[in-house]
Image (cartoon, grey):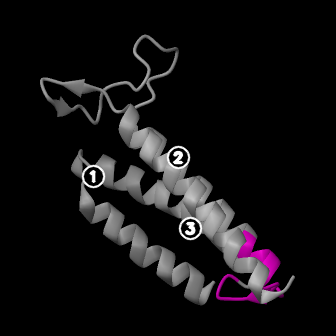
Amino acid sequence: MTRTRWTPITLSLAALMAALLAALVWAVPVKDGAKDWTAPLIPGGWMAWTFPIALFFWIIACLLITMTLLAIRFPETPRIGILRIETTRGDRLFITLLGSAFIHLAWLFVFGTLGWAPMLVCLVYAALVFWRV
């Protein structure tokens, strides 16, 4: 594909994801005049879809779309890092997501509550994985 065709594709997908995010924010229930961010998006539904859970899956979808566009636009060859296995961007994303889940679980076990600190640890971990693995 030519460079001129990538701009509309990327902008279209970005607009679609922004519209989905806006719909998620709009769907957050209002309680006593303020948005109740942890209330179920679908009252009485079979699963407690809260805004943070929906936002998590929205972020995963954005990551997958980004990785797909990068793989098509800029094909890569696998590289060998400190793990001594061949990894691609997708492999490193999977390792990052898996490791981030374990970091959050360990943080929850040790401190009993989550906050911004484990997220910052995960961002540093993700940078290291994409840089060295």
The picture places residue 107, in percent across and down from the top left corner, at 32, 55
> Which mark lies nearer to you, 1 or 3?
3
In the picture, the disc for residue 96 is 3
Locate residue 49 relative to residue 8 in the image: left or right. Answer: left
Q: Residues within 10 Å of mark 2 (few under 14, many from 20)?
A: few
Q: Residue furthest left?
A: 32
Circle 1 sits on which residue? Answer: 110
Identify the secondary structure beneath mark 1. Answer: helix
The Cα–Cα distance between marks 2 and 1, rounded to whole angstroms, is 35 Å
Which quadrant: the C terminus?
Answer: bottom right
> Which mark lies nearer to you, 3 or 2?
2
- Report the span colored magenta: 69-83
Circle 2 sits on which residue? Answer: 20
Is residue 21 shown above or below 117? above
Kind of residue at badge 2: Leu
Kind of residue at badge 3: Thr
Closer to the camera in the image, 86 or 11: 11
Q: Residue furthest right?
A: 1
Tags 1 and 3 touching, CB below 8 Å:
no
